[in-house]
Amino acid sequence: MAASENHMNKLLPLFAVGALMTFQAEARDNFVTSPTAPYPPGCTSSNNTGVITPTGGRQVYNDSNITLRDAGGGSDANVNLQVFRRGCIDEDRSLMYVRLEPFDFMREVAVPRAFLLRGDTRIPMRLTPEANTFEVDFTGFLLQPGVYEFLVDGAAESRFRPGDPVVTPQEYTGPITLVLQDALDPSNEYTLPLPAWLETIRPPRYPLNGRLSGPWVSAGAERQGFVISFNEFLAEDGVEQQVFFSWYTFDADGEPLWLASSNFYDFNASQVELPLSLLTGGEFLGDQAPTETPVGSALMRTEGCNEITLTYDLEAIGLGSGSLTLERSFALETAGYACRDVQARLDDLGR
């Protein structure tokens, strides 16, 4: 069976909103915001696919061999250290990574401690395998020969106390010094001055992801709007991404109109086609299925964390065609699915 036919067979009835919501996405870019995170949580959705540079969309600051204490008590082990950043779709925002490659046979080294410097103050950071894992810290874990990539993240939420220093997103992306200290030998450390992030290396577009779930509105469309939900289905061949789209508006006679759609999309895609159906004839709090009538189509495309473009064709029911800009219905993002870092959202409120 063709992939498209296979997908169509997996589409749930459009009215089964409850069933769709039970498959709420579990992807790493959907976790809540931590006040210690020095990057926009939604940045993890943008993996620089399509950014073509000699370094694969990375700004590399260090690529050299260092030595770390052998956990078995032998002589120091050789490790290739690479430090780099990847860009976010947001301006002046990036993700900082440390890549370790121990390559001495039968040796183990520990993941080093990480600090960022503010003057003479060392601000402890965590090395984590993924972003938005606010309690995970691989510092001190033993590594055998292989390749390991870690994000430089802020302090664990449970360990953070009011008054503790926090690296701001601006500092994290700007010129700053990274210190890596051997977890088995504190006297052995490496100081790496990092220049500011190159703004030119950025993802071309913000991809579809769970942080865009929630209510949306279009300016000037009074008392009407959209509910958009991004979901994941676990299949034998991996995870499939699906969007549920519901549009609450009015027809040419001013009567309420409910249009809905669902469709699958590829990881890192920034747009998805939506076949629109009109739902009628349902039952209040009953189990009578409404009638679904195909009436048109739409193309939903992300422009950023807080903006979606919807191009629609509803000629079949006399509502014409056109393009709308969708915006979030609140000043801040939907709770639990913030796209931007804390400071950026406070800036919007003038604080």
Image (cartoon, rainbow, N blue to C red):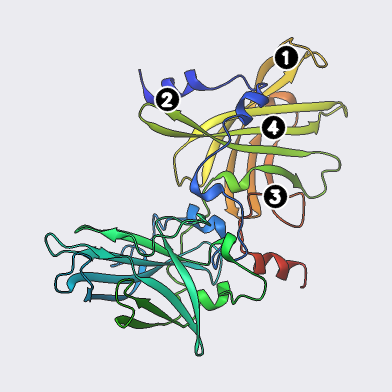
From the viewer's side, name the closer residue of 35 and 265. Answer: 35
Q: Tag 1 or tag 3, which sits nearer the N-term?
A: 1
Callout 2 secondary element: helix
Q: Tell me the amino acid under the disc marked 3.
A: Ala
Q: How crowded is mark 4: few (under 14 residues within 10 Å), some or many (20 or more)?
A: many
Q: Distance between the residues labelled 2 and 4?
A: 22 Å
Q: Tell me the amino acid under the disc marked 2.
A: Ser
Callout 1 secondary element: loop
- Whether the residues at callouts 4 and 1 have beta carbons within 8 Å, the answer is no
Q: Mark 2 points at which residue?
A: 4
Q: Mark 3 points at which residue?
A: 335
Q: Tag 3 or tag 4, which sits nearer the N-term?
A: 4
Q: Tell me the amino acid under the disc marked 1.
A: Pro
Q: Tag 4 or tag 2, which sits nearer the N-term?
A: 2
Q: Tell me the amino acid under the disc marked 4.
A: Ser
Q: Residue at x 53, y 43 (%)?
A: 271
Q: Residue at x 36, y 82 (%)?
A: 192
Marking on residue 246: 4
Q: In which quarter of the image is residue 143?
A: bottom left
Q: Tag 1 or tag 4, which sits nearer the N-term?
A: 4
Q: Tag 1 or tag 2, which sits nearer the N-term?
A: 2
Q: Distance between the residues labelled 3 and 2?
A: 34 Å
Q: How far apart are marks 4 and 1 (CA)?
A: 14 Å
- Whether the residues at callouts 3 and 1 have beta carbons within 8 Å, the answer is no
In the image as oriented, which residue stretches furthest toward the bottom? 120
- Whether the residues at callouts 2 and 4 have beta carbons within 8 Å, the answer is no
Q: Distance between the residues labelled 4 and 3?
A: 20 Å
Q: How crowded is mark 3: few (under 14 residues within 10 Å), some or many (20 or more)?
A: few
Position of 110 relative to 295 (above/below): below
Q: Name the residue under label 1.
A: 290
Q: How far apart are marks 2 and 1 (CA)?
A: 25 Å
